[in-house]
Image (cartoon, rainbow, N blue to C red):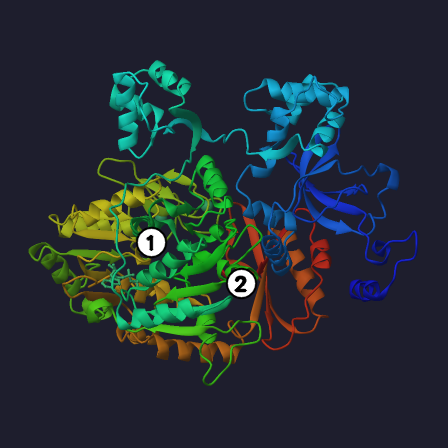
Amino acid sequence: MYIKSVKLSSVAVAEPGESYQSKTTVYGWIEVLVDCPGSSDLYTYKIPPQLEIKPGDILTVPFGTQQVGAIAIRLLTQPNVDLPADKIREVEDVVSKRFFPSTYWELLNRIAAYYYTPLIQVIRVALPPGLLGRSQRRLRLTSLGKDQDVSNNTSVFMSPTAQQVLQLLQKTPTGDYSYYYIQQKVKSSYRGTRELIRLGLAENYLEPPRQNQPKLQKAVTLIENNDRDLTPRQREIVEVLRRQGGELWQSELLQICSASTSILKALVEKSYIVIEEREILRREQSPLMAGDQAKSLTNAQTSALELIQSLNGFAQVLLHGVTGSGKTEVYLQAIAPLLNQGKSALVLVPEIGLTPQLTDRFRARFGNRVQVYHSALSDGERYDTWRQMFTGEAQVVIGTRSAIFAPLPNLGLIILDEEHDSSFKQDSPIPTYHARTVAQWRAELENCPLILGSATPSLESWISVKAENTSPPPHLPTSQYLSLPERINSRPLPPVEIVDMRRELQEGNRSIFSRSLQEALEQLQEKKQQGILFIHRRGHSTFVSCRSCGYVLECPNCDVSLSYHHVEEGAPQLLRCHYCNYGRSHPPHCPECSSPYLKFFGSGTQRVAQELNRQFPALKLIRFDSDTTRNKGSHRNLLTQFANKEADLLVGTQMLTKGLDLPQVTLVGVVAADGLLHLSDYRANERTFQTLTQVAGRAGRGEDPGRVIVQTYTPEHPVIEAVKSHDYQSFSNAELEQRQALNYPPYGRLILLRLSSLDPIQVQNTAQIIATNFNDTEGFEILGPAPANILRVANRYRWQILLKFAPDALPNLPDWQEVRALCPSSVSLTIDVDPINIM
Ligand SMILES: Nc1ncnc2c1ncn2[C@@H]1O[C@H](COP(=O)(O)OP(=O)(O)OP(=O)(O)O)[C@@H](O)[C@H]1O
Ligand SMILES: [Zn+2]
Ligand SMILES: [Zn+2]
C-alpha cells in the first residue's frame, strides 16, 4: 500500500486546494514510550499538524497532570480501536530530533524483530541506566536571546509571558533553567517559551540525569601573551601558564605558584586569562601508560592489514590467527588511520577478565581516545562514557557484549576479538541477542567492515568462509578469510602432552596431579619460570557426599549439589549453591545417617589450590576465578602481581583462557579435561576444543619454549587428539559434517522456549500444551518438551522446548502472540533465538 501511494504521488498533479500530502500515507498518531518510573507500556498520542515526528525523536507529552519526556516509537495511521478518540491527547513538542540516528534506530528495530522482543526492552538494553528515566528538559538562551533588550519591545514583538521568561533567563549567569523551574516561576509559561523558541531567542534541550551530573572543575586558560602592565607576581603566573601550554586546572596552578584566587581574579580583570568550569569525564581510572609505537609487521600481518585497509564499506572478515600470532597488533594498526580520518572503532571482547591487559595495550597506543564500556562500570562512569561517545569525536570503545550498542556516530570499524566466545550471547533476559549477529547488522547499516578474530573460530564463522565444497547456509553471511598461521618470530606452538589418568591410577599415583605435571611444577621455581593451571570449576569440589549412605548435600532451592568452599585455615567451611548463591555451613555429620565420614568429590579451584599447597609448599600461587575477582580492579591486581613474578603459578577457571599475553609463562596444565567434554549439549565438542586450544595457547609466548600437559580419562577422544595436534581444520570439518547430518547449527536454526514457574505441574502442563499446539505447524522439528538439565533453580521449575528449522526453508514461524497466550500468568516464557546454552 505504501509503495502504491508513492508511485501515485510521483505522477499526480495537485489540484488547487489539495496538497501532495494527502496522497501519501498520513500518520496522525504516534506511540511513545513515556519517561515515567515503572511505566513500560506504549501510549498513543495525536500528532498536531504543525509538528513533524519520526520514530527515535525525543518528545514532551502530557501525562496525567504533568509534562513528561518520551521517545517516539511508532507512527500510526489510526489509533487503536478501543481508544476513544476524544481521550487521546496531543504531543506537546519535539525536544530533540533524531536523538537516535536512523541507522541506530533501524538496528534496534531489527533486534526487536529477530529476537521477538518488544522494542522497549531493546531500547532499555541499549541506553545507559537512567538516561531516559531521569533526563529533564531545559530551556537556554541563544546568543540572540542573551543580547535581546527586554524593555525595548519595538525591535521584536513579544507577549508579556515571553518577556517574563526571557527576563528570568537573562538574570541567571548561564541563561539556562529547567522547564520545571520556569513553570514554577512564570504563570502559563508554556506559551512564552514556545514564543521565545520561535523567535530564535531560546532553545530547548535535554539535560543529563540529575544524579549523574557531570563533575566540573575550574580550568585557567591564557588568552593574552604580552605582559607589560603586570606585577612581578602576576607575570610569574602567566609565565607558569605559558610553560604549561597555556592551560591548567585552577587547583594545580594555584598549587604550583602557591598563589591565591584573588591574584587570578586580577588577571581575569586585565583580560589575561579566563577561568571556566570544565567537565572532568569520569572514566574507569587506569594507570598512565607509557606511549607505544606501532610494531613493524610480519608478512602475514602485513597482508592481513592490507586487505582490511582495502575494504570499502561493509564486509565481514574472519581473521584466523593461531594463539600469539599478533592479531591485536593488526587491530591496532587497522584502527590508527581511521582515528586520523575522524572515525571511531568499536572493539568487543568476551569478558572483563582480559579487558585490563587489552585495554592497556590500546591506551598505550591511542592514549585517552580509548574508552572502556562494560556492565561493571558505575552508573556515573557508564553515563559519562556514553555521553563522551555521543560527541562524535574519533575514539576507540572497548567493551563486552552490551558495548555493541555504543552510540558512536562515525563508526569506521567493528572488531569482535575471540569471536567464538559464548559470552557474546545473552541467555536472559530478552532480547537474547548475540553480539556477533548484532555486529553484523550494525556494520551493514553503518557500512563499515567487521573483523571477527580468533584462533579457534566458531563454526558459524568458519562456514562463512569455507566455500570450497559447501557454501554457507542462506541465513549466514559470507566473509573474507585472513590467516595468521604462525606465532610472532616463528615461535613454535607449544607441544601438548596428553596424560592418561587411568594409567596413573593403575601405576599407583593417587594424586590429582600426574607424575608429568608434578615434575613440571617442581621445575618451575628452579628455572624461574611461571605456569598456569586450568581447572574447569571454581569452588572446592563439585559435591559433598556421605561415604556411609551415599547422601549428597543439595541446595534446598535448586536441583544441584552444593559446592564446598574453604577459603583459608581457620575460616568457616561453607557449602554454596552456584546457581542461586544459597549458602550453609558444612555439617560435621551426615544429615541423613549421622555418619561423620563425608567425602568431597571432584576438584574445583580451591581444592586444587589446597592440594598444591600440600604437595608443593614452596610454590607460590594466585587463584584467579570468579570468587577471587569479584571486587572492582581485582583482575588487574592479580594479573599485575603475577606479571611481577610475585607468584609461580596462576590457578583458575575459564577466565584464564581468554587472551592473556604473559611471555614468561612456559607451563600450562589442564587438571581434568573430561569435565568439559561431558556436558550434554551439541556444542560440547566445539567448546572443549576451543577452551583447551586457547588455554594451551598461553604457553611459550616469550623467549622460552612452552609446554602443555592435559590430564584426561579419555585420551582417545577425537577432540583431545585434535588439541594435541593443534589441528583446527580437521576438527572443525569433522564437526561440521556431524552438525550437517543432524541439521544442527550452523546449518539448521534453533529456537529454544524456556518455561519456568514456581508450580511444577503448571509449567509441565503448559509446556505440553504449547508443544501439542506446534504439531499443526510445518517447517520445523519439535524436540521436547523436556525438563531442563537442572529442573529446579531458585525454586523455579524449568521446562524447555527446542525448535529445529531446516537451513534452506524460510522458517514458517509460529505465531508468538498465540504461544504467549497459552501461558498462564504463573508461567514465564523466554524465547531464546539461536540459543547457545541448551541446558
Ligand atoms: N609484528 C610484531 N613484532 C613483534 N612483536 C609482535 C608483533 N605483533 C605482535 N607482537 C607481540 O606478540 C605477542 C602476541 O601478540 P597478540 O597478543 O596480539 O597475539 P594474539 O594473536 O592476539 O594472541 P591470542 O589469540 O593468543 O590472544 C604480543 O606480546 C605482541 O606485543
Ligand atoms: Zn549418610
Ligand atoms: Zn540453589
Q: Position of residue 454 (x, y in %)?
A: 37, 66
Query: Most extreme residue toward the front, as rendered?
Result: 228
Q: Who's the residue at 52% across and 63% down the image?
A: 440
Up-down: is 678 above or below 605?
Answer: below
Query: How many numbered circles are shown?
Result: 2
| Rendered image: mark on residue 354 | none
What residue is shown with label 2?
447
Say whether residue 500 is visible: yes
Please identify, in this view, whether the residue under mark 2 or under mark 1 is nearer the observer. 2
Up-down: is 593 above or below 514?
Answer: above
What residue is shown with label 1?
655
Kind of residue sitting beneath label 2: Asn
For label 1, being within 8 Å of ligand 1 is answered no
Q: Who's the residue at 83% across and 62% down the image?
A: 9
Dot 1 lies on which element? helix
Is residue 364 shown left or right of residue 127?
A: left
Say whether residue 457 is visible: no
Determine the CA span between mark 2 and mark 1: 33 Å
Mark 2 and mark 1 residues within 8 Å of each other at the beta carbon: no
- Placement of the N terminus among the 4 image quadrants: bottom right
Is residue 614 shown left or right of residue 482?
A: left
Dot 2 lies on which element? loop
Query: Most extreme residue toward the left, as rendered?
Result: 526
User: Closer to the camera, 246 or 681?
Assistant: 246
Question: Residue 329: which quarter of the image?
Answer: bottom left
Question: Residue 210: which quarter of the image?
Answer: top right
Circle 1 Cα neighbour tier, 10 Å, few/some/many (<14 / 14–19 / ≥20): many
Kind of residue sitting beneath label 1: Met
Question: Residue 195: which quarter of the image?
Answer: top right
Q: Position of residue 816 (x, y in %)?
A: 69, 59
Q: Who's the residue at 46% across and 38% down the image?
A: 384
